[in-house]
Image (cartoon, coloured by chain):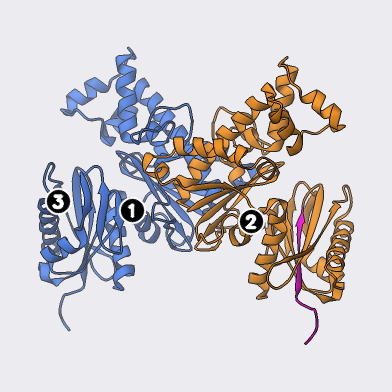
Chain colours: A blue, B orange
Amino acid sequence: MGSKKGIIVGVDLGGTSMKAIAVDRKNTILATAKAKTPSASKPKAVIAEIAALVKKAANGAGYKLKQVSAVSVGAPGQVDGTSGMVCEAANLGWKNVSLGTDLEACVGAPVAVENDVNAGTVGEHLLGAGESVSEMVGVFVGTGIGGGIISRGKLFPGSRGWAGEVGHTVVDPGGPVCSCGRRGHVEAFASRTAIERAVWEAIKAGKKSLIPEILKERQKDRITSSIIQTALSRNDPVMRAVMERAEFYLGVLTANLMNILDPECVVIGGGIAERLGETFVAPIRKTAYEFSPRSHAARKLRIVAGALGDNAGALGAVMLARQRLHL
Amino acid sequence: MGSKKGIIVGVDLGGTSMKAIAVDRKNTILATAKAKTPSASKPKAVIAEIAALVKKAANGAGYKLKQVSAVSVGAPGQVDGTSGMVCEAANLGWKNVSLGTDLEACVGAPVAVENDVNAGTVGEHLLGAGESVSEMVGVFVGTGIGGGIISRGKLFPGSRGWAGEVGHTVVDPGGPVCSCGRRGHVEAFASRTAIERAVWEAIKAGKKSLIPEILKERQKDRITSSIIQTALSRNDPVMRAVMERAEFYLGVLTANLMNILDPECVVIGGGIAERLGETFVAPIRKTAYEFSPRSHAARKLRIVAGALGDNAGALGAVMLARQRLHL
């Protein structure tokens, strides 16, 4: 009584960076903290860094670490939520890491572990663009493309928790080879990685582009969402063509998700959607309607940008922890 | 007591024919009856024919019509299972037909109405190829292509009961125009209608084929599943090429369903699968594995032909009636 115990810290663990968000009982954000994910480190070292970030977020909110009620991590790759294990996460180089129990030992509070994209979907569903619908699909466009399905208000897991792996949907069987080694997947057309690759291929093939100049001005070497935005604002023809192609295939994907799953709403999240918003989503929506049976298209099913930006994963992890730990 | 009341009659109502199956409490088939669906008739006339077919199936099983406990109809198109309304069925020319209440008045027993492809999926799930799994997808290849999704052992409806409308999945955005007016849907490559159209186009374009000869021998004008089988058995090059294309795109569809829904099993039903069995399913399976991430393909997820043939719809309707009417 009178204890400030009651905050939850959600963590979005990525291959290059991690973000922690401390929220109160009403899911109000009290503080956030960010850090680079240590690369080429052992899992134990990464887990120690996560614990330090949790402490930083709690302190930022005016709480001590021991006042944290629970921690919830959205982790990339295959996650077993029941045991808190990360079974396989290629971009962390992890196999069978007991993230839940190891982090619990560091923070002294119960820890829930969920797949990051499922967490992002739940975040957008409960606190973001999908509020008040019970059937939703989340599509997250980042380094790769992931997704999650909400049915009857809950995550739809499939037989092994892999449902909603929308990045490996075939949108053109003659298309380029995906990171997974197979052909024609939407991730090979429309992830940030695919966009970057297509830009450099066009430039190498002799197409004129402002992108090398923009990168130089900004002293960057990667084509980030911010670089994409600048190139589009300067009407760069290479970036325009590459983005049109990416948006077209994301529209085909969205049409397929509408047809197969009959949701009330499709939410497009991730860094590019956060940065470009409706500019990115409008052509996706147009193509999705064009490839859907007229009776579907006529419904004007909601296809919208995510509302939580890069907080979606950490906030969704919090909401999943509330369900799992009954908080 | 001692009454033989307890049989249920399931009806599969199609645009050209209908089939009724009388089953006992253990779902043992006691009798079946078939009839042509009256064409260009008013709904009332079609409903009277359904009632006559129900009576015929009951009589065939040794029961009077008044001894039938319930009737369940799998109807094409958009069905509202709660009210028993067929909202729209293009191949019957129906709009807002109160099939449930009208048929109840004719047969004097409670009537359930379900979508025919959902019924077929439930039939294969509970009594056919999907027995003992809880996550399954059914794909039915006929005049069109339909499907249904089973999740946690129950039909997955989506927001309006349209989930599993897999025929309108885009498998190649540059592909032919579908019956719905949109481009690249699997139905436009692989339905019996699409197969028939592709065969005639090839023959008109001058490709040599035995198909006109086979049709003449059989005194048929439509390319039925039986004609497809004969042409393949005689190694007809046109039929071989058309079927290879259809199977390829059904494989792409299956890969997408595996990725999006993470089922334990995909069941391929409908007339062609019934007729050709593993000959039809093997190339679909091969392509589905080729387009799935290796970790999925390595699982050897079950992709199998339906086990119930053209009884799937009527038997599934019976099983749905048991759930709906608590029988």
Instruction: Point out the tag, 1 or 3, that comes first from the N-terminus.
Output: 3
Q: Is residue A314 visible?
A: yes
Q: CA distance from mark 2 to mark 3?
A: 47 Å
Magenta span includes B6: yes
| Residue B129 in picture, x, y percent from top left | 59, 54
Which residue is denoted by mark 3 in the rendering? A43
Q: Nearer the viewer, residue A97 or A24?
A: A97
Q: Nearer the viewer, residue B76 or B313?
A: B313
Left-right relation of A24 to A40: right
Q: CA distance from mark 1 to mark 3?
A: 23 Å
> For the magenta stretch, what is the residue range?
B1-13
| Residue A209 in picture, x, y percent from top left | 31, 18
What is the three-letter code of the residue carrying label 2?
A: Asn
Task: Look at the picture and state if B114 lies above or below A300.
Answer: below
Which SS class for mark 3? helix
Which residue is denoted by mark 1 in the rendering? A120
